[in-house]
Image (cartoon, coloured by chain):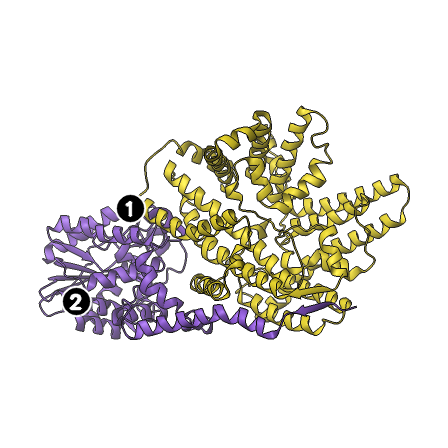
Chain colours: A yellow, B purple
Amino acid sequence: MLFNSAVFLQFFAAFLLLYWLVRNSLAARNLLIVVASYLFYGWWAPERTPSLSESTNYALGLLWHCRFLGLLVATSLFDFLVGLGLAKLTTPRQRKLLVAASVAANLSVLGFFKYCNFFIQSVSTALDHLGLDVSLPTLNLVLPVGISFYTFQSMSYTIDVYRGQLAPTRRVTDFLAFVSFFPQLVAGPIERASHLLPQFQQTRVITRAMLEEGVWLILWGLFKKVVIADNCAPLVEIVYGNAAYTGPAVLLGTVAFALQIYCDFSGYSDIARGTARVLGFDIMWNFHIPYAATSPREFWRRWHISLSTWLRDYLYISLGGNRRGLGRTYLNLIVTMLLGGLWHGAAWNFVLWGLWHGAGLVAQRITGGSELRKTLRMLSWAGTMVFILYGWLLFRADSLTQVAAMTRALADFSFPPWTSSFALNLTVFSLPLVLMESWMTVARNQLVPLSLPTPVRSLLQGVMLVAIVIFWERKEVPFIYFQF
Amino acid sequence: MKSHIYEFEPRDLARLISGPFVVLTLFAVAMHLGARTRFLPTPRPVLDTDRTILIHQAEASRTKSDAEVLLLGDSSCLMDISARRLGEQLGQPVLNLGTFSFLDLSAHATLLREFVRANPERPHTIVLLMHPEALRRVGSEEYYATALASFLAGTDPRPTTARGQVPWLLGADILKSRLLSRALPLPLGGAYGHVYGFNRNLEASLAAGRGSIVDPEPKSFSGFAEYRLSPTLERTSKAFRAAVPPNARLLVGMTPAPESFAGPRYPTQRAEMLRQWSQWLNADAALDQLPATLPDSSFVRTTHLNESAVAAYTDQLAAALKPQR
């Protein structure tokens, strides 16, 4: 189910009513959350096949739902049992074996669905380059929506229990609700068990302030998605869908993509947080004005925070972090970012994107960029933006061939005939974001609009609602991060 | 154990929700009022590729023009002929008002009437060109026919689906078609986006080509090469004829089909179809010198030629028209 769909509005309205009815029973609330979350998740279905009858389509849809829902339930139950097992086992060796088995099982499922074909195709290409004509079969796999998110969230539980940072839960519904909590199930934020799980075991208090925050975040998230991201998407397509590029076209297209991906993903995260706030839950901030960063390291403290901290805590530190000398620190950074890139998808451009950011972080460590940043703040910001924008080019390109062609085109300064139209669209759609985030930066508060007097805030929210209605497409546009 | 506690009053919730909805309601009322009182400009819904072309051609039909030769027809007329090149060949200004096969001859007749109303002394020659695939269609698609009729009437088309009613009622469609479409260039999707970029660039290309453009979207040959005249064609042909001013000559032709797709018997069939259609139209001449088929390599899809073939075919049309002047 998409947040930006009419069906979600109906679902959420019905859910809120049921949620109010179960307010006196914690067990009933968690059960309701599990059932609703599975319905939310299972609503995702492939396009209907026109050649099939309605009933056949319906039956196929049900099968489709059950298949991927089954995977989510199985992953959750497996990690729940691992948690209980870790509590029972006493010797460090047994505990280590069990957590290793859990991590291996989770990564195997993720690897099978996400990387199997990529691996087969890469081996096939490599053999082809070696002159060996071997035809390897690829599997016709569909990536279950949100698998990268819920797998990492579930893994964080078993690792935290293993590390002794969290007591395992004994109530299965609490755990199932933690893994499948619908506001953040399919595209994060990737929550830590130590933060979210205890909330399912407590009475939640929903205050007026939480409600106001929730409504604001839902509206602002929808505005970013529907008004900004979805209007930048066709701009990006004009450049990236083309075969002929020039420097200004690549630059404009990449700036549009930077806006699109940020507003798409942070919009989702805001709606997720807002929805959770309305229900009395607190999920983490996933973004903190990332394009204000003045260095690659600062960017990663502001961008997809739940993933970057996950990678830091469970991968970078496990590899030794910065405790084993400079050389090893650089290697750990590169490996962590490379795997972070690969987490996004099974393609070489994601690997390259990860390497690019890893190299940026290493370069910053080598040059000790923090002093420079303090003295030449604007220059550092501009340099960081160039670095990030080229990273987005690597991320968005369909192939390495396109990366090479676009990189070469940067030296061609001819302007396409549509430059002014493109620039006008980009200005119009980026302006609300720039104004809002400048205000947030100056106020050092992402919720600064809540400090406005009620009538002014209502007016602002009303204007945002009007803009959402105007640009609400009749065919919903899925969030980019659903594919990861 | 209690699950959750609500520490706010129902009126807090009502106040929170009602504020934005009051603004939305005021906006909707303002839009409908603005449209009804004609305070807002008339709709110009150039909101996608198809409507950009349709609205441009409809506007061109209402504009003062120097065209002596007017081309009318489906998308093969729009994209298989270069009006500028044809004008140069004939030594007379040519305007192309070709649109789509989604519209039938009654819609083309409407464009012709609009043109004659705006240019009573013109044109001397009207060339009606259709692809054989378009001739088997029974009528206009409602969506496009409504879009054209609403634009010419200066009204907002009412959505036909229940889902489309919501943005219309909330005033979103009115804002988009009356203000936003004028203020902001719209990026086009697919191959049109890659080649033309935005609707304004496509309109500029149409204006520069005197109503002609080149199809930028190659597609494999699809559909059936089962060509026939629709049972409604006789009626709509007569309606079209009625729109032709008495001092103008009506010439009719059929645009080419790919050789291998149409099959070897098609040229004979085409001759018969053209004769019958020309008779229903009471045309002054049928352009039977034009080739029924062209090599497959000349096409980007079954109905549209590629850029180099457009030039060659335009020259053939010019040669066919010269004796008719």
Image quarter of residue A303: top right
Tell me how far mark 1 sits from mark 2, CA to CA.
29 Å
Asked if labels 1 and 2 share a chain, the reply is yes
Relative depth, front residue between A425 and B253: A425
Residue B165 visible in the picture: yes
Name above or below for residue B204 compared with residue A91.
below
The residue sitting at 57% across, 63% down in the picture is: A212
Could you tell me which quadrant the N terminus of chain B lies in? bottom right
x%, y% of residue B284? 14, 65
Q: Secondary structure at mark 1?
A: helix
Whether residue A376 sits left or right of residue A277 in the image: it is left
Whether residue A183 sits left or right of residue B17 in the image: it is right
The residue sitting at 60% across, 71% down in the picture is: A13
Could you tell me which quadrant the C terminus of chain B lies in? bottom left
Assess disc 1: are there few (<14), some (14-19) or many (≥20) residues with their C-alpha within 10 Å of its C-alpha: many
Q: Secondary structure at mark 2?
A: loop
Assess disc 2: are there few (<14), some (14-19) or many (≥20) residues with their C-alpha within 10 Å of its C-alpha: some
Query: Tag 2 or tag 1, which sits nearer the N-term?
Result: 2
Relative depth, front residue between B274 and A264: A264
The answer to whether the residues at label 1 and label 2 have Cβ atoms under 8 Å apart is: no
Q: Which mark is residue B283?
A: 2
Please name the residue that numbered disc 1 is placed on. B307
